[in-house]
Amino acid sequence: MIRFDTERAIAEALKALPPPHLEAISAAEDRQASLTKPAGSLGRLEEIAVFMAGWQGTVQPAIDKASVVVFAGNHGVAAQGVSAFPPEVTVQMVANFRAGGAAINQLAIAGGASLSVVALDLDKPTGDISCKSAMSVDECLAALNAGAETVTPDTDLLIVGEMGIGNTTPAAALSLQSFGGSAADWCGRGSGVEEAGIARKVTIVEAAVALHGPYCTTPFETLRRLGGREIAAMAGAILAARMQRVPVLLDGFICCAAIAPLVKAQPRVTAHCLAAHCSAEQAHARLLEQFGLDPLLRLGMRLGEGSGAAVALPIVRAALAAHNGMATFTEAAVAQAL
């Protein structure tokens, strides 16, 4: 099991990111070239199959264990009216997840994935980032490890989602601190706030980055000061997945903002990730551009919970079904192109 016991452990992990298996990539590319279809005719499905081969280390990868993990946390900044919903909805939605009544429950079933929910100190909101750090050192390490502990080497594909009223505000702050621009570039409607709510978010994000920015000298400090428990947990899970060569389907804005400080420090950290979709939250496209990732889907979704990634999971399954199940030209006695 991967654990990050100190801030230094995060920095060391970012310096020691394992690469994909190049031999498996080459073998998978050779298999694609031998299948009964014109070269490149399955488009990105071919790329997905080769990607999965590289991270699973086999010419014919499979998804026997797809895992969706939803992390939940509460935010002190929610008291400033940055969400269309009150903070108690976080607890209520965790109960809904566990009862099987949320969108992600249905989408995980449809994609053939298991679903687990990790609630992180919901009775203890983080600090209001506009005037104090979100978490202490120990709290941030605990959240990172809560995420890391959900990832096991036998996981074939990981999806991480979140629930946390007000969490688009810390996500915007993390994005601004990591990639610059203006607070307005990173603040959107989130759960459905109107223009006045967006204006409040902009002011809060500006104040948070002005206060904490000079001290955000490492990815850990950025997450600790500007993030949240569920956000840090997602970062921990995605980094732990990389250390174990587990491929990840990235969800929406919050999920990507969680690793923005890691990407800023080490752009290669997303090499084991596919961008599942581009959400309707306008800042998500900006993050994907910074990450250099092209989303598989654009469906106008903005729910979070890992929902967009769960919708994309059947596409990955389709890519592997074609890659593994098609006959080669030799097997089918079909003449190849001249």
Image: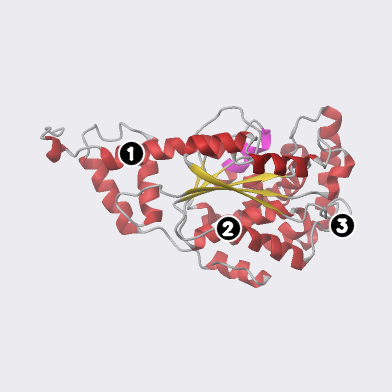
Tell me which amino acid carries mark 2.
Answer: Thr
The answer to if 36 sits in the magenta stretch is no
Q: Secondary structure at mark 2?
A: loop
Magenta segment boundaries in residue numbering? 281-288
Q: Quadrant of the N terminus?
A: bottom right
Q: Of label 3 and label 1, which has the lower sequence position? A: 3
Residue depicted at 72% across the width and 50% down the height:
174
3 vs 2, front mark: 2
Q: Which residue is mark 1?
A: 321
Q: Secondary structure at mark 1?
A: helix
Q: Secondary structure at mark 3?
A: loop
Residue depicted at 61% across the width and 27% down the height:
300
Instruction: Count neighbours of disc 2 (C-alpha within 10 A) and say few if under 14, some if 14 to 19, many if 20 or more.
Output: many
Measured in 3D between alpha carbons, the distance from the residue under mark 2 to the one under mark 1, in whole angstroms, is 27 Å
Measured in 3D between alpha carbons, the distance from the residue under mark 3 to the one under mark 1, in whole angstroms, is 50 Å
Tell me which amino acid carries mark 3.
Answer: Lys
